[in-house]
Image (spheres, coloured by chain):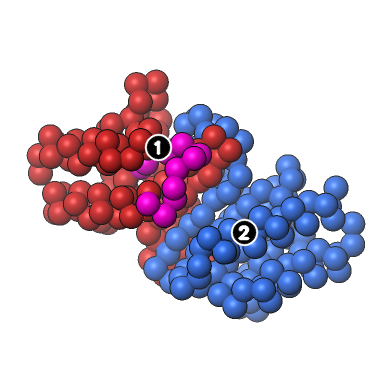
Chain colours: A red, B blue
Amino acid sequence: MKEEDLNAQLAELVRLNPQIEGSALVSSDGLMISSQLPANFDEDRVAAMSAALLTLGERAVDELEKGVPEQVTVKGDKGYIILTSAGSEAVLIVLARSDVKLGLLYLDIKNTSKKLKELMY
Amino acid sequence: MKEEDLNAQLAELVRLNPQIEGSALVSSDGLMISSQLPANFDEDRVAAMSAALLTLGERAVDELEKGVPEQVTVKGDKGYIILTSAGSEAVLIVLARSDVKLGLLYLDIKNTSKKLKELMY
């Protein structure tokens, strides 16, 4: 796996959609793999928090019988945080503005997640 | 606030949309207020887990500068768990099947959340 290739995929996702502010790929244990986050974010904290959120999402899906966890979307009044499984060992994080078209965003994320998986495994 | 009125709102939400399997209203500290969940779910565990998920969602929104937390959506391959703020002290939980039309579901949830707030405060 080449770091540049992962970075290029993340950058392409941000480039595709002007409402996307940043993206990152984090390992399931909460460590940053590759990041295209805005400069003002602490990458380590973002990575750790994302892993924690996905872990709790997994517990919820398990307990409420919703099968295999795929995605956690957190909506605030100023935008979205979207965590998507990218294989069993990584999570794609996307930050988007509140005026994003969610349907289009989910499609872009799905495609990127697929490409990242192909690069990683 | 009347328990029957809250229950009636939750039941109406489930009735409106055949893809919704259940709904519940939980206090921010993780205690069940009113429930229309399927019989096989442990209400106390659902309530506690929902509050934990929303708390972590709040931290994420805060840390990633996404304003005031409004909603957490967890997607599994067998369906959705959607947590929505209903005022500052309660959370609306909705369980839906994977074939639900998300746009319609979010509209129904928004309306129900508004009505629940009116009943509670």
Residue A60 against residue A36 in the figure, above or below: below
Q: Position of residue B10 (x, y in %)?
A: 73, 67
Check the residue under mark 2 and report the chain it is in: B
Q: Which mark is residue B107?
A: 2
Give the magenta part as a residue range.
A93-104
Check the residue under mark 1 and report the chain it is in. A
Q: CA distance from mark 1 to mark 2?
A: 22 Å
Secondary structure under the numbered disc 1 in the rendered image: loop
- Residue closest to the far left: A2
**Residue A64 image position (x, y, % from top left):** 53, 68
- Please identify the quarter of the rendering in which residue B3 is found: bottom right
Amino acid at the residue labelled 2: Leu
Going by the image, does B73 lie left or right of A92?
right
Question: Residue B107: percent from the left, percent from the top?
Answer: 62, 59
Seen at 65% across and 79% down, the residue is: B39
List the residue tagged with mark 1.
Answer: A19
Q: Is residue A95 magenta?
A: yes
Q: Is residue A87 above or below residue A97?
A: below
Q: Dot 1, crowdedness within 10 Å: few (<14), some or many (≥20)? A: some
Label 2, residues with CA under 10 Å away: few <14, some 14-19, many ≥20: few
In front: A70, or A32? A70
B69, A120: nearer the viewer: B69
- Is residue B112 in sight in this rendering? yes
